[in-house]
Image: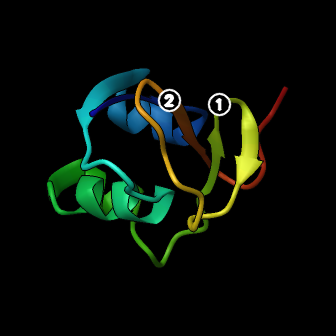
Amino acid sequence: MKVSVRYFAALREALGPGEQVELAAGSTLGALRDQLLARGGRHAEVLSRQRAVRCALNQVLADEAAVVGEGAEVAFFPPVTGG
């Protein structure tokens, strides 16, 4: 299934505004993050498990156990963003 991934604040500066990602049905936000980490490079650096990264599913804050559905919008951002 395809999901839309968006990045904000410092993550956006490092990875760009976002991308479309293929994800196995029934995957969680944590599994998506792991899939992005496995790419290595900037993804591994910016989304590292040693860094605090928040996520939202369809514009609602969610933890990594949340299941992602087809066509979902996932956002990753640092815990504090400016505004």
Q: Residue lying farthest right?
A: 83
Disc 2 + disc 1, Cβ < 8 Å: yes
Instruction: Compare residues 47 and 27 and report the one nearer the observer.
Output: 27
Q: Residues within 10 Å of mark 2 (few under 14, many from 20)?
A: some
Q: Position of residue 33 (x, y in %)?
A: 38, 58
What secondary structure is marked by label 2?
loop
Is the residue 11 above or below the residue 54 in the image? above
Q: Residue 36 has which mark?
A: none
Instruction: Give 4 or 82, whichever is nearer the viewer.
Output: 4
Q: In this figure, which residue is indicated by the disc labeled 2? A: 72
Pinpoint residue 28: horizontal percent, then vertical percent.
46, 59
Element on which disc 1 rests: loop
Amino acid tagged 1 = Asn
Q: At x 70% / y 54%, what residue is drawn?
A: 62
The disc labelled 2 sits on which kind of residue? Ala
Which residue lies most toward the front here?
Answer: 26
Which residue does the image show at 32% across and 61% down from the upper left?
Answer: 45
Q: Residue 29's spot in the image, x, y percent?
A: 49, 56
Is tag 2's residue or tag 1's residue first in the polypeptide sequence?
1
Where residue 75 sits, quadrant-wise, is top right
| Scheme of colours in the image | rainbow
Give how far apart the Cα atoms at labels 2 and 1 are: 6 Å
The C terminus sits in image quarter:
top right
Q: Which mark is residue 58?
A: 1
Q: Quadrant of the N terminus?
A: top left
